[in-house]
Amino acid sequence: MASVHEDVQNYYGQQLQQSADLKTDACCTKAQIPSFIKEIIKKVHPEVVAKYYGCGLVMPPKLEGCRVLDLGSGSGRDVYILSNLVGAQGYIVGVDMTAEQLDVAKRFIDYHTKEYGFEKANVEFRLGKIEQLTDDPGLKTNSFDVIVSNCVVNLSPDKKKVLQQVYEILKPGGEFYFSDVYADQPVPEELRQNKVLWGECLSGAICVSDLISGALDAGFTQPILVSKQPIGVNNDELQKLLGDIKFTSCTYRLFKNKPAEESTSVNDKFGALVTYQTPINHYENEFQFSQTITFKLNGEPQYLNTELVEMLRLSRYSENFKFDSITNEKQIPNVTEQVTDQPVSNEQSSSSSCCCCPGTC
Ligand SMILES: C[S@@+](CC[C@H](N)C(=O)[O-])C[C@H]1O[C@@H](n2cnc3c(N)ncnc32)[C@H](O)[C@@H]1O
């Protein structure tokens, strides 16, 4: 395990200097960025932006005042966007194990504090491994509202441990919102040993089915897919090694539900009709809960099953929604999209199931 960490540190600390040095498109997938976030990115220091290696957009709605942790924060682009979104009352911690990446991020704390007009910094960067978050006395159990991560979990040699750690330090009702790379079939061991393919966020990728089992084992709710995008390797030599394995960048949200005794969902045995009725800043027209569920403000109520209602009710989004519980099984609308966002087969995959072999994740 030590050698995977060292190889990744070497890749991100020594070999890569900026996004343009990446050999494939995996760690630099172009995400759809809303215009208000584009405006914030314009304020982020260009040196930080040039060292961005993410594969999605990890900015969920309603962050104002939140305490947020970014796992594998790199040189800090997302931390500085989040810093603006949480505002002066919020706080962001970035954790990364690569000192060179953290050094860049730390150099620009004052710059962004001034740029955003904050009296004091709302950002802090900590050196550490995402498999050992709870060893850091600065990262306490149940202490973050939201945890994000952009193209990092695939690089970990112990993804299950990462999910357990995230669950531990997330507050009950909190959300893990993260983008990562997934493979449509188990990546063979010889490719997993290839340091460039691992560093490029490809050969450490697991299958969605393994994410789901790891998340459920850690205690999270069913993962909710928010968006996905196929990844082009765009490197003939590496593509040849990878053969027909297809990769997809996916953004998921996982909720840590409150303990059952605090749950308010006793009436939601048959689900509920849910309306988005109090607008969230920047999401005044609609709220996208998952890839298949988008609520229009004061639009037609949508039927959500028990599990999804519980997630929403216990989350920080709860007060923005109206829940009309269904009291009788016969009232359940005949919706084909009873969405629990089951594993997606990757866009270009021919197989709809994807199971990693034991021990490969
Ligand atoms: C692909 S880059 C993404 C960086 C950043 N999230 C971004 O979007 O620019 C991966 C980052 O994760 C860090 N990293 C990888 N594995 C890690 C681990 N196990 N613990 C802590 N940091 C890790 C690397 O040092 C690197 O900075």
Image (spheres, helix red, strand yellow):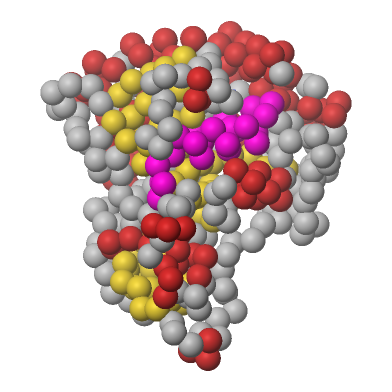
Outermost residue toward the front in this view: 261
Q: What x and y, as percent, mark residue 302?
A: 43, 76
Q: What x and y, as percent, mark residue 80?
A: 33, 28
Q: Is residue 87 magenta?
A: no
Give the answer, above or below, for where 307 lies relative to 118. below
Whether residue 337 appears in this view of the structure is yes
Give the answer, above or below, for where 183 lies relative to 9. below
- In screen coordinates, is 209 left or right of 281? right
Residue at 43% of width from left, 52% of height from top?
Answer: 258
Between 38 and 97, the one nearer to me in the picture:
97
Outermost residue toward the bottom in this view: 330
Question: What span is in magenta?
Answer: 149-174
Between 224 and 344, the one nearer to me in the picture:
224
Give the answer, above or below, for where 304 lies relative to 160. below
Between 331 and 51, the one nearer to me in the picture:
331
Whether residue 42 appears in this view of the structure is no
| Quadrant showing the N terminus | top right
Q: What x and y, as percent, mark residue 241?
A: 83, 30
